[in-house]
Amino acid sequence: MTTAFYSDERCFWHGGGNYAFTLPTGGLVQPGGGLPESPETKRRLKNLLDVTGLLREMETRTAPEATWAEMARVHPETYLQAFKAASDAGGGELGLRTPFGRGGFEIAALSAGLATAALRAVLTGEAANAYALSRPPGHHCLPDFPNGFCLLNNIGIAIRAARAEGRLGRVAVVDWDVHHGNGTEAVFWDDPDTLTLSLHQDRNYPLDTGGLEARGGDRAPGSNLNLPLPPGCGHAAYLHAFDRVVLPALHRFRPDAIIVACGYDASAVDPLGRMLLTAETFRLMTRRVKQAAADLCDGRLLLVHEGGYSEVHVPFCGHAVLEELSGSAIRAPDPLAATLEKRQPDARFDAFAKAWIDEAAVTLGL
């Protein structure tokens, strides 16, 4: 079996309209630039995979749109109806920073469909593991309120579909996007069979979620773990967070499958984060979670693409992840590696960050 890689050109056609960075244009905000969540980071990742030949070592697939019934297991009918109506009427914005054009509903359903099909392939044994190049992303989308570029909760829809088919019991979602995975947290807040674990920059986005104290609902205490990290954390701190928090939490929970909300916006050159990760960091985090899947759940592992807004660096970070996921010998050396190594925090900051993580681990009971 090989790694299955799910993508669809139509996902690159999702558009947000007249924005400049994260602000709607008008008044003193000049037009130009567009949203950071553009198709180029994802398209350039796929292009790099094609140029290096790594794409040909994986099984490339597409998938149908998620069905209305699949989406309705996460999102209320009223939300889906409003989204579909606005999409048919030419687009709009139903939440915070979630603009879309005509046909945006169908593209979002396709993005969720890629994640759903990829999880199914992993659970049925059709693939050793899988990667879904989903766009628009999903980890910020609440059941009834889209935000942070996310219009449907792709991972939530995939999990609920797999359970409806009787294929999935306990599942762990590890979110290493630089922003708190508030949508996935909300979907599974009261679900004791789903562990949601988010590593994120403290008080980045959203500003009011992601604290250590958010541990799950009354029916699922301890099922949600947040690890907010101070801005400036780099390679060593993230690997320490994995070894001190993520891996112990996975081994304690013992899931039947692991899903990674795979954002690349903790990259050192991302415009929406203030972390200092390198392509090698993403490689080694993938290595750790892949080994955890092998130890705990027969290797059942899915990565679903989330954020990441550096057109230059995302392709190399993503390539490193997929090299590790697929076990390929093909390499795409990070052209920023030498510079980013020099930009890593010094020993004093690393000691501070590791102490922060150790203290959080104790608070989380790990």
Image (spheres, rainbow, N blue to C red):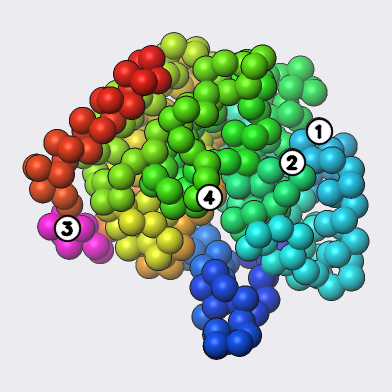
Q: Is residue 327 magenta?
A: no
What stretch of residues is rendered in magenta?
A: 335-342
Q: Which residue is mark 2?
A: 143
Going by the numbered disc 4, the residue's amino acid type is: Pro
How crowded pointer 2 is (Cα within 10 Å; few <14, some 14-19, many 20+) is rated as many
Q: Position of residue 17 (x, y in %)?
A: 67, 76
Q: Which mark is residue 343?
A: 3
Considering only vertical position in the picture, is 312 above or below 327?
Answer: below
How far, Cα to Cα, is label 4 from label 3? 27 Å
How far, Cα to Cα, is label 4 from label 1? 24 Å
Considering only vertical position in the picture, is 73 above or below 32?
Answer: above
Going by the numbered disc 3, the residue's amino acid type is: Arg
Going by the numbered disc 1, the residue's amino acid type is: Arg
State the predominant SS element of the stretch in magenta.
helix
Going by the numbered disc 2, the residue's amino acid type is: Pro
Mark 3 or mark 1, earlier in chain: 1
Q: Is residue 336 magenta?
A: yes
Mark 1 or mark 2, earlier in chain: 1
Q: Residue at x 63, y 85 (%)?
A: 26
CB within 8 Å, label 1 to label 2: no
Mark 2 or mark 3, earlier in chain: 2
> Mark 4 against mark 3, which lies toward the viewer?
4
Q: Is residue 123 left or right of residue 323?
A: right
CB within 8 Å, label 2 to label 3: no
Q: Which mark is residue 206?
A: 4
Mark 4 or mark 2, earlier in chain: 2
Q: Is residue 59 visible?
A: no
> Mark 4 against mark 1, which lies toward the viewer?
4
> Mark 1 against mark 2, which lies toward the viewer?
2
